[in-house]
């Protein structure tokens, strides 16, 4: 009798978890949110069509500032996409089981980010119709060719890392989500691939996930290293650095962790997931963000201290503009609000509570975007050949309104993908959560 009662209680708990974590239709705020994002994207598309018709002249990019906020945005998207390998691979292989409720969130962010990183490159091209030439006439000597290869590879692995662990959840939705629309049920049925929770299926799935978790780490490091090489292989002041590879990787880990924390807080509030995204998860992520921020702080000091000590003429002009010149307010704001304050706040337990963590995460994300702006833009105003007899607008770069809006629409587009994926699929893995609940009943803690 006791076994029957235990089994019934276990079944009731499993059903409760399934109902809690099933995707839910948008409420009023959800519809407003989607509508706002769609309007931003639609206006951005209109401005981009204008850019195709009239060329990059609608932007502030000229002969000297040939890279603008489009490339800064590209570097930002590439950076935040690293969160997929951080949460789904590195923490998984290290045995950090507390990361389970966060994996789906991080994988969705990674997929949306890397998709728009590829799209932003096309937006930055004055002649997007010639994009195929990059593939048809690729030269292995070009870092741009390496970038195309590694971004494509990373996108494929990220999609697989999102999809494969989702298969058991799709089977659960196929069997339980029968009150929704017919097309949604059919979608779950097709994507579940006939999953029946057979031990052999689970063995193959776990093996595949393990292989992908191992594969994505060198590819993730490669994508950020190659992106840094696009800058470091030049002789321009501010880019001519051997530090750029680890500098980019450490910064990507930091902003990726910030992105997960912000998404955790929003989904916890929107879907009432307090029992699954607990204060303990925020505490662990806060500690992780402190560690990643300290590593990034070290590379920041190294990046500026060494050239400041040598003070070559070109580097001197670049650093003075950052530290004391026209870019100094933005530079010091990024350092203080995007890195120093987050480290100080997260050192204390109270600072690692959900709401303070959300505020800190937003500061980290905004600071990270403008940090990429500072990496890309200022150095272009210090060419080795002095600017003479050129229009005043060529000597400075200030993005136009249309340029800002197109950039903002790519960010809105990434948020739109994240929103729709969270509407269609469980934002927290159902099958893994049930598995951990059962393990906890047998005496093994979930958070270890």
Image: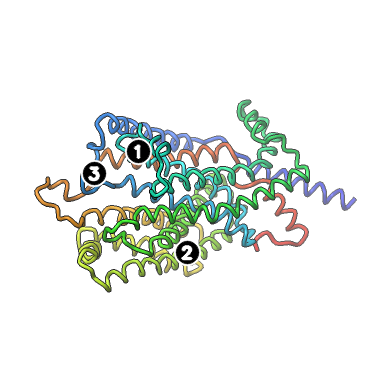
Label 3 neighbour load within 10 Å: few <14, some 14-19, many 20+: many
Label 2 neighbour load within 10 Å: few <14, some 14-19, many 20+: many
Element at label 2: helix
**Which x, y percent locates residue 202?**
73, 46
Q: Which residue is mark 1?
A: 123
The earlier-in-sequence mark between 1 and 2 is 1
- For the residues labelled 1 and 2, the Cα–Cα distance comes to 31 Å
| Left or right relative to 277: residue 201 | right
Q: How many numbered markers are drawn? A: 3
Of 249 and 28, nearer the camera is 249
Q: Which residue is depicted at the point 73% across and 58% down?
A: 440
Residue extending farthest left: 389
Q: Which residue is depicted at the point 44% across and 61% down?
A: 250
Q: Which residue is mark 3?
A: 61
Residue extending farthest bottom: 309
| Quadrant of residue 200 within the rendered picture | top right
């Amino acid at each position: 009798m006791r076994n029957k009662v235990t089994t019934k209680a276990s079944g009731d708990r499993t059903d409760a978890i399934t109902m809690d974590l099933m995707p839910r239709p948008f409420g009023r705020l959800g519809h407003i949110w989607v509508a706002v994002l769609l309007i931003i994207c639609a206006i951005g598309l209109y401005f981009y069509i204008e850019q195709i018709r009239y060329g990059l002249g609608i932007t502030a990019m000229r002969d000297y500032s040939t890279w603008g906020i489009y490339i800064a945005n590209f570097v930002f998207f590439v950076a935040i996409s690293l969160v997929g390998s951080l949460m789904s691979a590195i923490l998984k292989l290290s045995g950090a089981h507390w990361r389970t409720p966060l994996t789906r969130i991080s994988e969705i962010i990674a997929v949306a980010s890397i998709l728009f990183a590829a799209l932003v490159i096309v937006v930055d091209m004055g002649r997007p119709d010639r994009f195929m030439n990059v593939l048809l006439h690729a030269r292995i000597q070009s870092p741009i060719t390496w970038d195309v290869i590694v971004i494509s590879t990373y996108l494929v692995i990220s999609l697989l890392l999102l999809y494969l662990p989702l298969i058991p959840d799709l089977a659960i939705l196929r069997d339980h989500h029968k009150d929704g629309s017919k097309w949604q049920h059919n979608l779950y049925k097709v994507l579940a691939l006939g999953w029946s929770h057979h031990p052999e299926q689970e063995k193959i799935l776990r093996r595949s996930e393990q292989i992908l978790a191992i594969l994505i780490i060198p590819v993730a490091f490669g994508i950020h290293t190659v992106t840094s090489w696009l800058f470091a292989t030049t002789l321009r002041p501010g880019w001519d650095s051997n530090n750029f590879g680890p500098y980019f990787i450490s910064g990507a880990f930091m902003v990726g962790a910030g992105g997960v924390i912000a998404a955790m807080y929003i989904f916890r509030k929107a879907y009432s997931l307090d029992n699954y995204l607990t204060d303990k998860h925020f505490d662990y992520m806060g500690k992780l963000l402190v560690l990643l921020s300290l590593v990034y702080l070290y590379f920041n000091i190294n990046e500026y201290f060494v050239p400041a000590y040598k003070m070559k003429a070109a580097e001197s002009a670049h650093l003075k503009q950052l530290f004391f010149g026209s870019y100094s307010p933005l530079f010091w704001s990024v350092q203080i609000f995007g890195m120093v304050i987050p480290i100080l706040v997260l050192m204390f337990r109270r600072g690692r509570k959900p709401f303070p963590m959300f505020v800190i995460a937003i500061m980290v994300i905004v600071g990270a975007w403008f940090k990429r702006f500072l990496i890309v833009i200022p150095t272009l105003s210090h060419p080795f050949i002095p600017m003479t007899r050129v229009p005043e607008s060529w000597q400075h770069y200030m993005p136009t309104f249309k340029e800002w809006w197109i950039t903002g629409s790519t960010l809105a587009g990434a948020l739109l993908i994240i929103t729709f994926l969270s509407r269609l699929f469980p934002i927290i893995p159902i099958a893994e959560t049930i598995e951990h609940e059962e393990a906890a009943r047998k005496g093994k803690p979930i958070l270890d």
